[in-house]
Image: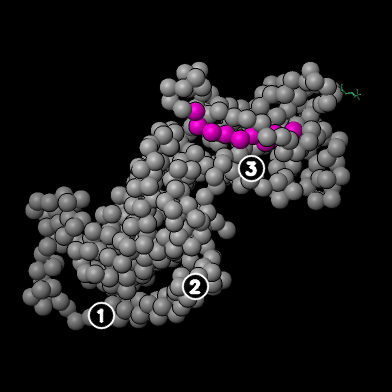
Amino acid sequence: MWGWESQLLETGFLGIFLCPLWTLSRLPTGTPPSQIVLWGFRWLIFRIMLGAGLIKIRGDRCWRDLTCMDFHYETQPVPNPAAYFLHQSPWWVHRFETLSNHFLELVVPFFIFLGRRMCILHGALQILFQVVLIISGNLSFLNWLTMVPSVACFDDATLGFLFPSGPGGLKDRVLKLQEEAARGARPPPRYGCMVRRAVHMALGILVAWLSVPVVINLLSPTQIMNTSFNPLRIVNTYGAFGSITRERTEVILQGTASPNASTPDAVWEDYEFKCKPGDPGRRPCLISPYHHRLDWLMWFAAFQTYEHNEWIIHLAGRLLANDAMAVSLLALNPFEDRAPPRWVRGEHYRYKFSRPGGQHAAAGKWWVRKRIGPYFPPLSLRDLEDYFRSREWPYPELE
Ligand SMILES: *[C@@H]1O[C@H](CO)[C@@H](O)[C@H](O)[C@H]1NC(C)=O
């Protein structure tokens, strides 16, 4: 399971306790959210940020010599157009970016514990940080999700501007309720309130107890990234980009209609994915918060081998049959409305951003690519029969 799925689960789990649930009708209007739940969110964002910061300085030398951002924009899983331009910044900008990242992940999280004003400052900085990350890359909904627990630092006075004012408006009603509460005009606590309090106390104890291994992991020099220590994944440990790849490689899937894959005159045509780099002339995509899972997996496949990623052979088999479902995951199938390819192969390429003003950019190319070698050899549907059978995969049917 990806780190962000655990993060979604944990955020959602805490969110449940913001709802009054079955005590809805029994709670007096204006009952504020429980402080325990709000602290649960603050504790969550603290762990996310500090975990991410610590794994970096422990994980990769480039986070310590401040050179990581020289590589990140180009080598991140799915770059966007802004990443192309950010990558071209001078070296001292990249140093500053890396240093700012450390400040936001290693120092700012502690603001949560320094009182109301510092907590608000923390929330504002974290949200700004996530916005910058959304602008600079396609990291699915992760950055949007990370904004959610930061909101727990803002109180009514900070968030008031979001709501309409005026007599009878929500803001007006809340002010009245707060005045009543200040005058001590609250009715005695009802049964529902007491149940709610007990549930929240239990939640607080549970989170504190499940946090023990998480804190031990954070303090440990052999910190692990993205793990759960309990089967329900309620309190997890996070961290992203602990190491940064220095070079971008891509697997390019190609097919040919030629009956003989080894003749030099076989014409190989590229399949194009929805978002990941392929055709160097294609502008990087912008999809956050959306996510193309296959494109993301192709990023991992590119710095491993096909033996680690047997699914890519499965995909090749489907492409050999022009399988409608597999083809729907791609942006371009060169064999659309034609007979399926006789052979499919995977080629391994090195990719670099072109330089604005350079000859490649002038030719409309965002990327410059160079072939490294084969990733997997040309395969025909017949070649794959045993491979599919031994893995109990359904053998692709030719129409
Ligand atoms: C395919 O082409 C290669 C290279 O031209 C040749 O050596 C080989 O015999 C051909 N195979 C078949 C089955 O025709």
Residue 207, image x and y in percent? 42, 75
Residue 190's disc is: 1
Q: If the image is split into quadrants, where does the C terminus sit?
A: top right
**Residue extent of the magenta highlight:** 345-354
Residue 194, image x and y in percent? 30, 81
Q: Is residue 53 visible?
A: yes
3 or 1: mark nearer the eye: 3
Residue assigned mark 2: 220
**Badge 2, how many Cα within 10 Å: few under 14, some, many 20+?**
few
Callout 3 touching callout 1 (CB < 8 Å): no
Give the SS element for disc 2: loop
Residue situated in front as seen by the camera: 196 or 51: 51
Q: CA distance from mark 2 to mark 1?
A: 45 Å
Q: Is residue 346 magenta?
A: yes
Q: Residue at x 71, y 34 (%)?
A: 373
Residue 54 shown left or right of residue 389 in the figure = left
Q: Is residue 41 magenta?
A: no
Q: Residue at x 12, y 51 (%)?
A: 165
At label 3, the amino acid type is: Ala
Residue 302's disc is: 3
Residue situated in front as seen by the camera: 226 or 27: 226
Q: Residue at x 69, y 21 (%)?
A: 337
Q: CA distance from mark 3 to mark 1?
A: 60 Å
Q: Residue at x 59, y 43 (%)?
A: 299
Residue 27, image x and y in percent? 26, 72
Q: If the image is split into quadrants, where does the N terminus sit?
A: bottom right
**Badge 3, how many Cα within 10 Å: few under 14, some, many 20+?**
many
At label 1, the amino acid type is: Arg
Which comes before the other along the chain, label 2 or label 1?
1
